[in-house]
Image (spheres, helix red, strand yellow):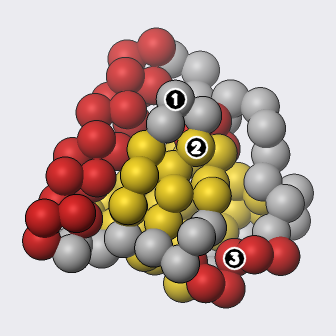
């Protein structure tokens, strides 16, 4: 399976899975903490994050700046909403 990298503006046609992809509560909490750190660094320093997400077509990588964060969604620069439950991993660049 090949991971493809997409920018936030290119993800409008993706259908994200709406079930939780992480099973361990510690990993879910770590993802929440990392998303919050990405939010702070994105707003203040315009840092990019790379999200590994699960879509109905398979695994994808999305790169963008986190502008807002709710319990259910991550909002990236450009208006893309990504469900938190479909994010497997994230990295800050």
The numbered disc on residue 71 is: 1
Q: Residue 60: image x %, image y %?
A: 65, 69
Q: In front of the other: label 2 or label 3? A: 2
Towards the viewer: 32 or 56: 32
State the image quarter where residue 28 is shown.
top left
Q: Which of marks 1 and 3 is nearer the N terminus?
A: 3
Q: In front of the other: label 1 or label 3? A: 1
Residue at the limit of the structure toward the left, as seen here: 45
Q: What distance separates the C-alpha of mark 2 from that of mark 3? A: 14 Å
Towards the viewer: 9 or 92: 9
Position above or below: 87 against 24: below
Q: Name the residue under label 3.
A: 11
Crowding near the residue tagged with mark 2, few <14, some 14–19, many ≥20 C-alpha atoms within 10 Å? some
Quadrant in the picture for the C terminus: bottom left
The numbered disc on residue 73 is: 2
Quadrant in the picture for the N terminus: bottom right
The answer to whether residue 5 is left or right of residue 49 is: right
């Amino acid at each position: 399976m090949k991971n493809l990298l997409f920018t936030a503006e290119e993800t409008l046609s993706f259908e994200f899975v709406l079930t939780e992809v992480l099973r361990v509560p510690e990993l879910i909490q770590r993802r929440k903490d990392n998303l919050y750190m990405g939010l702070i660094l994105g707003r203040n320093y315009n840092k990019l994050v790379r999200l590994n997400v699960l879509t109905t077509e398979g695994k994808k990588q999305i790169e963008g700046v986190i502008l807002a964060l709710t319990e259910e969604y991550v909002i990236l620069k450009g208006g893309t909403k990504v469900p938190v439950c479909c994010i497997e991993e994230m990295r800050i660049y």
